[in-house]
Image: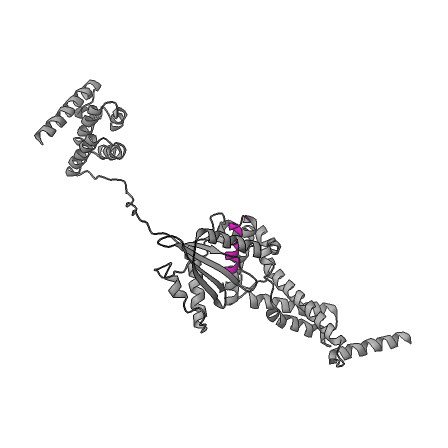
Amino acid sequence: MAKKETVRDAHVAEGKKLLDQWGINLAQLQDRSISVEILNERIGQNPTADVALAALLGDYPTPEAAQALVAWDTKTTDKQLRRAIHRSLYKLSQKGITIERPVQEPPRPILAPVEPEGYLSPIDGRGDRLLWLVKPKVGGGLHYLSAVVNESEGMRYFDAAEINRKALRQMRQDFHSRMQMSMVETPWRYCDFVMYEGYERAKAKGEKEIEAYLAHRSHLLSVPAQPVAVPLPVTLDRDAIVVDDTLLQTSVQLFEEPELQSWFFDHERAHRYTDQISQVQESPLILNRMQQQDRVQTVIDNALNEVFSGEQGAVYARRLEETALYLAATDRLEAAKRALAVSLALKRNTQGGKGIPFCEELVRQSIVMHYHEEKQHEQEESRGSLIMKPAEFAARMQAAQARRQGMR
């Protein structure tokens, strides 16, 4: 130990000689003839001078000296110099100087836990979407968990298997070839949340086919599923989208996207509205076309309020938000912005979908499409039927009477 101290003292003494030649000493620091910044300029010019500078700063109890030593400590790899720095920092702390060291990140574990991966499909007109979770398994290969989850009904189906990377790539390619759509990479926590939420909803309805889901989930995840908001990318700025009126005004263009062309109402939902419109047009109390148009608009307004308010409105808002995520992931940023604009408008609108072009078009086109289909079906049935409905009989009688009057 005595020999080491002798060597160290010799280095400090040799370094002090250099400092004296440079005109650097403690008295000059104390009377502010030189500054700590000037000392920093001398760092690295000579190893023994560096050791002497570190020792000198330890005798100068100021925050500036402490900061200089801490900064120096993070840069040097010289063991002897670092020891001199640490001794000086200790001396400063003993004199009441606070030593503020930079916060260091904890070392990462050598075997960091392997994160799962998530994949998501677009939502179809029925509210179904496909989700995948995969995670590398010990010994090679992947644990694979797949589920079809409906927005309202919950989990319809799930599957679990052990696959490899080649099979996963092939499955994505097959999905794209078959459906002309993509399974896009999505944060796994969101996929897990949607799956689990769907499982709970289906379980509450008494569905038995999904009971083994939790057991298969445990092969990938040991932590409970947590509620997660739709993980929108940073390219979708909510604040900017809310104030951009053109996005909402052009939201009807969303129906040009293949994934949204199946969103129109099914027959069951549309029938109640087409039936009301049929009653309006067949009613003998309606005197003119303008009255009919007013009554039809009332039916459409009621549909906009019923479909896009309350729980159903929340479902559509989330569907559009998730669609924005999907469109952005498939490089359709403008369409993604429109989808998010409609979602945000639904969340703040007090009249359901009224005044939102996308919603109005969805309702109008759904009703028109099913109305024409029903009328065509009725005409086909009437051609082969001997039974005439009262409305049809009355219409024929009025037509015959008009013809007779015209012949007089």
- Tell me how many marks there are: 0
> Compared with residue 154, is residue 80 higher up or lower down, i.e. above or below?
above
Residue occupying the far left of the picture? 2
Name which residue lies at 49% across and 49% down.
237
The reply to whether residue 242 is in sight is no
Quarter of the image with the N terminus in it: top left
Q: Relative to the observer, which residue lies in front, 292 or 336?
A: 336
How far across and down, in percent of the image, does residue 323 sit?
Answer: 53, 56
How far across and down, in percent of the image, does residue 198 sit?
Answer: 45, 65
Q: Is residue 322 magenta?
A: yes
Q: Relative to the observer, which residue lies in front, 309 or 168?
A: 168
Where, by quadrant of the figure, is residue 228 drawn? bottom left
Q: Report the magenta stretch's main SS.
A: helix
Name which residue lies at 49% across and 56% down.
120
Residue occupying the far right of the picture? 408
Name which residue lies at 62% across and 54% down.
256
How far across and down, in percent of the image, does residue 401 sit?
Answer: 84, 78
Quarter of the image with the C terminus in it: bottom right
How far across and down, in percent of the image, does residue 398 sit?
Answer: 81, 77
Q: Relative to the observer, which residue lies in front, 400 or 373?
A: 373
Residue occupying the far top of the picture? 21
> Compared with residue 342, is residue 54 higher up or lower down, i.e. above or below?
above
The reply to whether residue 328 is in sight is yes
The chosen color scheme is one colour
Q: Which residues are magenta?
A: 318-331
Where, by quadrant of the figure, is residue 35 drawn? top left
Where, by quadrant of the figure, is residue 200 drawn? bottom left
Name which residue lies at 69% across and 73% down.
278
Q: Is residue 41 magenta?
A: no
